[in-house]
Image: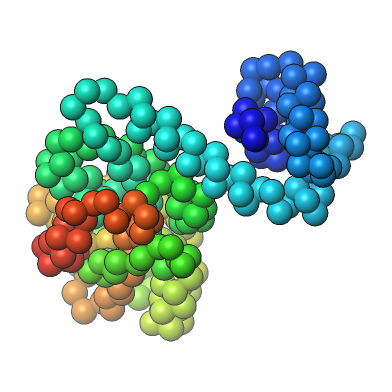
Amino acid sequence: MNMTALQTFLAIVDSGSLVRASQKMNVTQSTVTSRLKSLEDELGQVLLNRQKSGTTLTPAGVKLLRYARVMAGLWRQAQYETSLPAGLEAVCTFGCDSTLWHGPGKAFFNAVRSGNPEMALSVHRGTGRDLQAWLAEGAVDVILTYEAVSGGSQTIHPLPAERLVLYSNRPVTPIKSDPYYVFVDHGADYRRRHGESYHDAGIARINFDCPSWAMDFLLENGGSAYLPQYMAAPHVARGALHVVPDAPVFRRKRNLIVNDSAARNWAWFEPLMEKLKATHPD
């Protein structure tokens, strides 16, 4: 099977049309059409319905899509590994939730980098959904995420839970009914527990779904918000933020999920996981 034709199929699916796929791949539309036809001829199936408004997958196209993403991901990995310069023997491709980079993400990265000088590292930032898809496709070897869904060839390694603490720029701040309270969305489970604890507190005027943005807002404009303890700690140390006493503390699960076929060749992985679990509480 021609890998270029397979990548063209994915470009059409992801962009929604042959025209946009040709622009994305920087080739002519006739080239995209030719590559798609060669793939369909090889499989003996029509993969896409062509319409003026764009393209849609046929039943055969839906079946191929899952395998195409896996094969394309493995091909990228193979290209990366075979082109490594002298002195590097393998590569670890790491996907990390952007919120988790400053903390367990950087700890994992630094431990792999310092303990395995023969290994190249490739780091990718993504949402929980992105990371799960990349791991399933073989585009990454290991992910750090708040999610805990894995397939049969993946292993979940729970890390110490993230502590979400109520902080304020003022030394004295009410726990409830603070007019300057900023709501930070830390996920569905957090929303439920927060609602139970603050069911009578009213609705926050300002909301963020990114804790680092919320922290920047507090530092620049003042207010109170629930933030990861590790993220707020440096600002507490210098007196810019204060813990609100007696406020409920919430916990959010964090997981490192690894592709078992990759970890099978990593003698360093299990000892590193034990170290991270023991030395990286929030």
Count of all numbered marks drawn on residues in the image: 0
- Quick check: 37 left or right of 119? right
Q: Would you identify the image quadrant in which residue 1 lies?
A: top right
- Quick check: 81 left or right of 7? left
Residue 183 location, x and y as percent?
A: 42, 63
The answer to whether one can see residue 174 in this image is no
Q: Would you identify the image quadrant in which residue 176 lies?
A: bottom left
Residue 147 location, x and y as percent?
A: 42, 64
Tell me if residue 128 comes above or below residue 254 in the rendering: above
- Quick check: 25 left or right of 94? right
Q: Identify the residue at horizontal 30%, vertical 55% (top origin).
A: 263
Query: In front: 196, or 201?
Result: 196
Residue 42 location, x and y as percent?
A: 76, 36
Q: Identify the residue at horizontal 9%, vertical 54% (top origin).
A: 237
Query: In front: 132, or 53?
Result: 132
Q: Identify the residue at horizontal 19%, vertical 45% (top origin).
A: 112
- Quick check: 71 left or right of 183? right
Quarter of the figure with the C terminus: bottom left
Tell me if residue 98 comes above or below residue 121 in the rendering: below
The answer to whether one can see residue 140 in this image is yes
Residue 180 location, x and y as percent?
A: 37, 60
